């Protein structure tokens, strides 16, 4: 299978709580050519931990980039194309992290591994968008 992009929670679950992944998500990860994570996910985890919204991640913040490397995962840097698309997506969803992750999935043509059904609304305006769960 081609590379896949993981939503932030999907990567955290794959890394620390794999039992939370769906069978389809597990299969996608095990057969993917590479597992990718948007750089914004590191910011999302760090910010939510700092705000007390993800307390179980506080003690793990320093190890996150190294964990992705150990997993032979690939960090996808943000670029202007993805950021502009995130700001103009035809999607009534206000979460900036989700908007950027969706834009990265679209600009890289990678399926997104995510438990969040909110992403399914992207299929109408963006038929190439795929969410795996």
Image: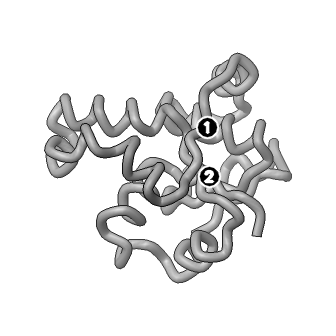
Residue found at x 17% / y 51%: 56
Colour option used: one colour
Q: Where is residue 38 drawn, in percent x and y?
A: 55, 39
Residue found at x 38% / y 46%: 66
Q: Residues within 10 Å of mark 1 (few under 14, many from 20)?
A: some
Q: Is residue 71 above or below residue 92?
A: below
Q: Give the total of numbered labels.
A: 2
Cβ atoms at labels 1 and 2 below 8 Å apart: yes
Which of discs 1 and 2 lies nearer the camera? The answer is: 1
- Tell me which corner region of the image, top left, top right, bottom left or bottom right, holds residue 11: bottom left
Q: Where is residue 110 drawn, in percent x and y?
A: 73, 52
Could you say whether the residue bearing mark 2 is in a helix, strand or loop? strand
Question: Of residues 133 and 19, which is closer to you in this image?
Answer: 19
Q: Where is residue 61 drawn, in percent x and y?
A: 25, 40
Q: Which mark is residue 76?
A: 1
Residue found at x 58% / y 70%: 29
Of the 4 image quadrants, the one containing the C terminus is bottom right
Q: Which residue is mark 2?
A: 5
Of the 4 image quadrants, the one containing the N terminus is bottom right
Q: Residue furthest right?
A: 127
Say which label, 1 or 2, has the lower sequence index.
2
Q: Where is residue 34 drawn, in percent x and y?
A: 65, 59
């Amino acid at each position: 299978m081609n590379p896949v992009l993981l939503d932030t929670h999907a990567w955290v679950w794959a890394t620390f709580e794999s039992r939370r992944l769906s069978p389809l998500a597990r299969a996608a990860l095990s057969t993917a050519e590479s597992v990718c994570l948007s750089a914004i996910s590191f910011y999302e985890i760090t910010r939510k931990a700092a705000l007390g919204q993800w307390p179980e991640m506080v003690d793990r913040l320093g190890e996150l980039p190294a964990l992705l490397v150990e997993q032979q995962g690939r960090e996808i840097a943000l670029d202007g194309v993805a950021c502009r698309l995130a700001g103009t997506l035809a999607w009534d969803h206000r979460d900036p992290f989700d908007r950027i992750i969706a834009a990265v999935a679209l600009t890289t043509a990678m399926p997104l591994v995510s438990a969040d059904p909110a992403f399914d609304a992207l299929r109408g305006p963006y038929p190439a968008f795929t969410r795996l769960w």
